[in-house]
């Protein structure tokens, strides 16, 4: 249970350490040019932070360089100034400090544990909210699960030296009590073949645990999928099976990492092999979590999009697509930063540099930012939706997709036009899909041989046709004799068809035009066409 809590706290600490800026040197008040010079000077052994101290100490232990490892213990300094490796006074003999380093490694190999790389503080002042004094930092446990002793680092600073983190005197005393000197000498005589600073049998054991856990959970996930198919009905199985099929692969991979951590964290094998596996197991865990979250986002977005389309809320469906893409980009950025931090890259410096880099990016990517803002404007204002027929500038067609950068329009020629969203936000958009009625506005020209009585009768009959047509909205319908044209007496029709469908409006217009033509035939009135009458006058001669 303790190992599981350690695992959870490690991931939470990793996330906080990744995105919260580390405490700066201003936390500890210093003054004067000596302090500034001390902070600027780099420690040759890399003991500036708890993470760098533990990492460098493990590297020295893996190399078998116990004289160098002795420089990471508060009680392990030799007679030199601490800036050179501690060595024995007599060549060929191992110093007491080097023996202490051997004992520390032996204590860790017998069930001691260190925090994962990502959970170690990468700040010069350590974690300030762990309940310990500011100059103390817990980095692991010594002695297994029964009466464990915390492994502490202490921050040591001198007037002419940079501040550094060293294994505390309290921990070195616990190591002395836990590992007798003869145990260290016997372990040195019975060394196995080492690979990367750890016995090959330890590497093989940890690999075997990882492989066994992988096949165990992989088989369990396949069994769950099989049972869900057999037990559930067809309708239920389609949804549940798709969910299990999407969630189980990344979830099983994460459970593999969790199981490996629970088993290997306190396993009495080489601390070098354990920390190496646990460090990169954290990368696998982040990948599994990102994989699971990506599939979860896709699944939720698919369900919501289907509901919005059934409810004909096409703009909401476009907004869900936009939010899904944004969430996936954000998630991938978080996972990438976490993985880079676990590898050992200084992501806090990179994140701090985003303030300056963001300005340069904004200047160099103004169009991209403009398109993103345009996307938000389209989603909020909703001038059009996916599936609408619209005219955007000179482009007329059906909106097929509203993306984060551009909108795709399928023209009547079946070509696909991509319009940047920044242009859409400032351009004129004429949406034909939101019309609640269609206009019928025609001008009919009859011949000039039509007299006034015939014109009055014709207007009465035409008005009756509009009133009898069920597809015409009576509120604004009118027929008026409105002028004398060059070649015809002009009659204007103005009415609206009661429909939202463009094809239906064409059919209604066609039926109405046929009714008008038949009425003209019944009354014997002709439709005028451009004509010109020329009067010739004979010239009279005397």
Image (cartoon, rainbow, N blue to C red):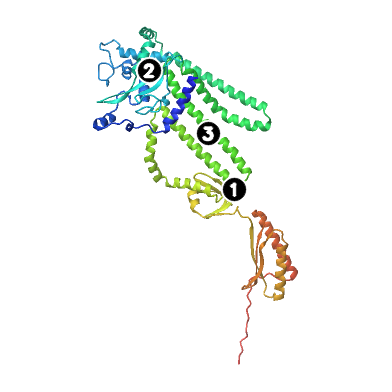
Say which element carries label 3. helix
Q: Is residue 56 left or right of residue 161?
A: right
Between 158 and 309, the residue placed more toward the observer is 158
Q: Decide which of 160, 384 is in the foreground and name it.
A: 160
Residue placed most toward the observer, 15 or 518: 15
Q: Marks 3 and 2, Cα distance to the nearest angstrom?
A: 38 Å
Residue 95: x and y, percent?
29, 12
Pointer 2: residues within 10 angstroms few (<14), some, or many (20+)? Answer: many
Q: Which of disc 3 and disc 1 is earlier in sequence?
A: 3
295 is higher (above) or lower (below) than 191: below
Q: Which tag, 2 or 1, sits closer to the chain's start?
A: 2
Question: Is residue 392 positioned above or below 403 on the image?
Answer: below
Q: Which residue is mark 1?
A: 387
The residue furthest right is 522
Determine if residue 451 is in view: no
Label 2: which secondary element: helix
Q: Position of residue 294 (x, y in %)?
A: 53, 34
Task: Give whichever of 135, 207 is nearer the camera.
Answer: 135
User: Which residue in the structure is indicated by mark 3?
Assistant: 294
For the residues labelled 1 and 3, the Cα–Cα distance comes to 27 Å
Residue at (50% x, 23% y) in the render: 258
| Pointers 3 and 2 in contact (C-beta within 8 Å) | no
| x and y percentages locating residue 210 in the rendered image | 50, 20
Left or right: 453, with 486 as reference point: right
Numbered mark located on residue 62 in the image: 2
User: Mark 1, residues whose alpha carbon is within 10 Å: few (<14), some, or many (≥20)?
Assistant: some
> Is residue 376 among the parts visible in the rendering?
yes
Q: Position of residue 312 (x, y in %)?
A: 62, 46
**Eye-nearest disc, 1 or 3:** 3
Q: Residue at x 25, y 18 (%)?
A: 80
475 to the left or right of 211: right
Of labels 3 and 2, earlier in sequence is 2
């Amino acid at each position: 249970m303790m190992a599981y809590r350690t695992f959870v706290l490690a991931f939470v600490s990793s996330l906080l350490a990744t995105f919260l800026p580390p405490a700066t040197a201003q936390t500890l008040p210093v003054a004067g040019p000596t302090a500034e010079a001390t902070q600027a000077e780099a420690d040759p052994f890399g003991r500036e932070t708890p993470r760098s101290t533990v990492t460098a100490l493990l590297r020295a232990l893996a190399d078998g360089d116990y004289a160098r490892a002795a420089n990471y213990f508060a009680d392990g300094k030799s007679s030199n100034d601490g800036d050179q490796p501690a060595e024995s006074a007599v060549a060929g003999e191992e110093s007491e400090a080097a023996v202490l380093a051997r004992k520390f490694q032996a204590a860790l190999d017998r069930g001691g544990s260190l925090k994962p790389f990502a959970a170690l503080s990468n700040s010069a002042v350590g974690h300030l909210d762990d309940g310990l004094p500011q100059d103390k930092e817990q980095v692991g446990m010594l002695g297994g699960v029964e009466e464990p002793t915390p492994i502490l680092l202490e921050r040591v600073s001198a007037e002419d030296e940079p501040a550094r983190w060293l294994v505390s005197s309290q921990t070195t005393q616990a190591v002395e009590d836990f590992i007798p000197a003869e145990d260290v000498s016997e372990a040195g005589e019975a060394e196995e073949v080492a690979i990367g600073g750890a016995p090959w049998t330890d590497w093989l054991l940890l690999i075997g645990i990882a492989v066994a856990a992988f096949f165990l959970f992989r088989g369990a996930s396949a069994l769950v999928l099989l049972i869900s198919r057999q037990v559930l009905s067809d309708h239920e199985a389609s949804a549940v099976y798709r969910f299990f099929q999407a969630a189980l692969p990344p979830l099983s991979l994460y459970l593999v990492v969790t199981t490996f951590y629970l088993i290997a964290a306190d396993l009495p094998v080489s601390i070098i092999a354990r920390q190496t596996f646990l460090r990169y197991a954290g990368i696998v865990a982040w990948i599994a979590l990102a994989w699971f979250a990506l599939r979860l986002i896709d699944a939720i977005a698919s369900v919501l999009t289907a509901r919005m389309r059934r409810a004909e809320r096409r703009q909401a469906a476009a907004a869900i697509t936009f939010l899904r893409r944004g969430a996936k980009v954000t998630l991938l950025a978080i996972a990438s930063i976490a993985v880079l931090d676990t590898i050992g890259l200084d992501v806090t410096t990179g994140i701090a540099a985003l303030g300056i880099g963001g300005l340069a990016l904004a200047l160099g990517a103004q169009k991209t930012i403009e398109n993103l803002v345009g996307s938000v404007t389209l989603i909020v204002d909703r001038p059009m939706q996916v599936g609408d027929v619209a005219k955007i500038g000179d482009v007329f067609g059906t909106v097929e997709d509203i993306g984060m950068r551009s909108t795709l329009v399928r023209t009547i020629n079946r070509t696909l036009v991509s319009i940047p969203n920044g242009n859409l936000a400032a351009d004129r958009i004429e949406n034909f899909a939101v019309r609640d009625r269609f206009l019928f506005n025609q001008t009919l020209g009859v011949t000039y041989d039509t007299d006034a009585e015939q014109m009055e009768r014709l207007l009465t009959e035409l008005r009756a046709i509009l009133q009898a047509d069920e597809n015409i909205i009576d509120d604004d319908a009118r027929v008026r004799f409105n002028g004398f044209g060059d070649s015809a007496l002009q009659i204007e029709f103005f009415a609206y068809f009661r429909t939202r469908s463009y094809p239906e409006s064409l059919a209604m217009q066609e039926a109405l035009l046929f009714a008008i033509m038949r009425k003209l035939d019944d009354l014997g009135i002709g439709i005028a066409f451009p004509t010109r009458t020329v009067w010739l006058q004979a010239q009279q001669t005397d």
